[in-house]
Amino acid sequence: MKNVCVYCGSRPGRKSDYSLAARQLARTLASRNIGLVYGGASVGIMGELANAILEEGGNVIGVIPKGLFKREVAHAGLTELREVGSMHERKSLMADLSDGFIALPGGFGTIEEIFEIITWSQLGMHRKPCGLLNVCHYYDNLIRFLDHAVTEQFIKAKHHSTILIDERPDVLLDKFEAYKAPETAQWIDRKTI
């Protein structure tokens, strides 16, 4: 695994544990010589994550759309910062650069991005691991909802099982290393949409 994409908040959140978890994830990635791909901001959990991996000597690629460049306060000290034309380009490039995807706590953007990449997995557009770093039980209610969606037969159990979940970054990354994607016929080619 060369790079992992991490989706997370551009705000720090209510608990200092969220920033601590971002720093712990950064140290874990760096210790395994895994680079970070993320949204390119210097603020919130995004900034904590990028700063921590840079402090550890790790590689960080930020991808940020032109419209957010000023509003999100692009991080000036990254290994590489790529500016793209739209959010769609951002998500596509981040997916192409990454070998796996993790969601730390975050808001609408974080949830939307991890679910889009999970959907791409379900559709057979990639076979990369996707996970939730469930810091302070942040994702417990979301996990219960997903269980409910399986019970109600809107999500297949095999697709639910593709979402790897843990509270500790080292254990989550071990799960990534052992991950075998379920056999799924590719429904659609991402490059054609």
Image: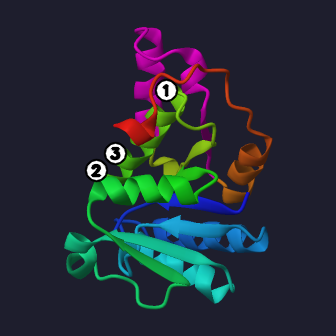
Which numbered dot is residue 123?
1
Colour mapping:
rainbow
Magenta highlight range: 140-167
Question: In terms of secondary structure, where does tag 2 sit?
Answer: helix
135 left or right of 30 in image: left
Q: Nearer the viewer, residue 39 or 89?
A: 89
* Circles 3 and 2: CB atoms closer than 8 Å: yes
Where residue 8 sits: x, y (%)? 42, 61
181 left or right of 125 in image: right
Residue at 47 percent of width and 35 percent of height: 120
The residues bearing labels 1 and 3 have C-alpha atoms spaced at a distance of: 16 Å
The residues bearing labels 3 and 2 have C-alpha atoms spaced at a distance of: 6 Å
Of circles 1 and 3, the one toward us is 1
Q: Earlier in the sequence, mark 1 or mark 3?
A: 3
* Circles 1 and 3: CB atoms closer than 8 Å: no
User: Label 2: which residue?
Assistant: 108
Of circles 3 and 2, the one toward us is 3
User: Label 3: which residue?
Assistant: 112
Determine whether 90 is above or below 143 in the image.
Answer: below
Residue at 71 percent of width and 53 percent of height: 173
Question: In terms of secondary structure, where does tag 3 sit?
Answer: helix
Where residue 190 sits: x, y (%)? 43, 38
Going by the numbered disc 1, the residue's amino acid type is Leu
Q: Nearer the viewer, residue 67 or 166?
A: 67
Residue at 40 percent of width and 26 percent of height: 145
Q: Is residue 156 magenta?
A: yes
Of circles 1 and 2, the one toward us is 1
Residue 49 seen by the camera: no
Determine whether 66 is above or below 136 in the image.
Answer: below
Mark 3 Cα within 10 Å, few/some/many (few <14, many 20+)?
A: few
